[in-house]
């Protein structure tokens, strides 16, 4: 934990210098590509700091504050809504409220990272990026199945690979789902999440 804290301090120092340099470049009317390069450097430092925070969260136990009556479909809609401008059309299927015993905020984080991961891994077609369909269906077993379909075939398990920012977040999403007594899998070009609706 202390090592990550020290690394984040170093990254913040680098970001400070890069921000100072960007301001000087803007004032001296340097070429646009130099300003763009500094912008990319600052964005990269921000992503690295964010990844370090996610790794720290992954390394810690998931402590849940569950509440009864959390509406899975409502949490899911909120998580998917933030990706409307990504070029992916996310379609919600299913009707009626699906309520369960969950930590609303941690479940919202997990769904948000699953939406982001689905968009990254969506199927490409001749017109460009394909549509992502998100469904939530209650099952007879007292569980709910949530699926993100429209993904391309992958040659690895995106919930266990840790290969990049999005998949670090997918690993943490899976850990949150598992802490709720559920499972997260990549199967048949889908993210498939199963969650128990009652307290386990």
Image: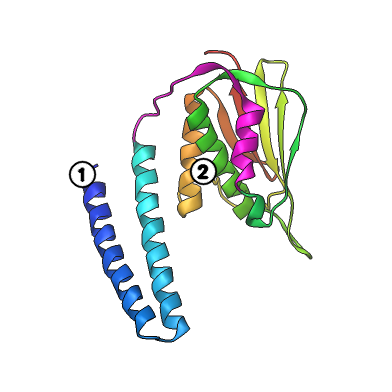
Q: Badge 1: few (under 14), some or many (20 or more) residues near its Cα, within 10 Å?
A: few
Picture colour scheme: rainbow
Q: Where is residue 57 in the image (x, y as percent from the top left)?
A: 37, 38
Q: CA separation, marks 1 and 2?
A: 24 Å
User: In the rendered view, does 84 fall on the left or right side of 33?
Assistant: right
* Quarter of image, res 44: bottom left
Q: What residue is at 55 percent from the left and 45 percent from the top?
A: 157
Do the CB atoms of the residues marked 1 and 2 lie less than 8 Å apart? no
Please tell me which residue lies in front, 118 or 34.
34
- The reply to whether the magenta stretch includes residue 181 is no
Element carrying mark 2: helix
Q: What residue is at 75 percent from the left and 23 percent from the top?
A: 96
Please tell me which residue lies in front, 24 or 10.
24
Element carrying mark 1: helix
Q: Is residue 123 above or below residue 139?
A: below
- The reply to whether the magenta stretch includes residue 77 is yes
Q: Where is residue 18 in the image (x, y as percent from the top left)?
A: 31, 70
Highlighted range, magenta: 60-82
Mark 1 or 2, nearer chain start: 1
Q: Mark 1 points at which residue?
A: 2
Q: Is residue 173 above or below residue 139?
A: below
Q: What residue is at 29 percent from the left and 71 percent from the top?
A: 20
Q: Mark 2 points at which residue?
A: 170
* Quarter of image, res 23: bottom left
Q: Where is residue 169 in the image (x, y as percent from the top left)?
A: 48, 45
């Amino acid at each position: 934990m202390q090592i990550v804290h020290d690394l984040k301090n170093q990254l913040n120092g680098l970001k400070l210098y890069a921000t100072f340099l960007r301001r000087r470049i803007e004032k001296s009317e340097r070429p646009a590509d130099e300003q763009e390069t500094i912008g990319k450097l600052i964005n990269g430092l921000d992503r690295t700091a964010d990844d370090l925070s996610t790794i720290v969260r992954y390394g810690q136990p998931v402590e849940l504050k569950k509440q009864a009556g959390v509406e899975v479909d409502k949490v899911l809609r909120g998580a998917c809504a933030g990706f409307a401008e990504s070029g992916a059309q996310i379609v919600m299927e299913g009707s009626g409220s699906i309520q369960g015993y969950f930590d609303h905020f941690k479940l919202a984080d997990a769904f948000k990272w699953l939406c982001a991961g689905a968009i990254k891994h969506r199927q490409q077609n001749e017109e460009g990026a394909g549509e992502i369909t998100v469904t939530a269906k209650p099952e007879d077993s007292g569980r709910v199945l949530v699926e993100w379909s429209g993904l391309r075939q992958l040659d690895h398990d995106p919930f266990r690979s840790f290969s990049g920012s999005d998949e670090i977040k997918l690993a943490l999403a899976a850990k949150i789902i598992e802490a709720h007594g559920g499972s997260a899998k990549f199967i048949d070009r889908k993210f498939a999440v199963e969650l128990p609706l009652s307290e386990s």
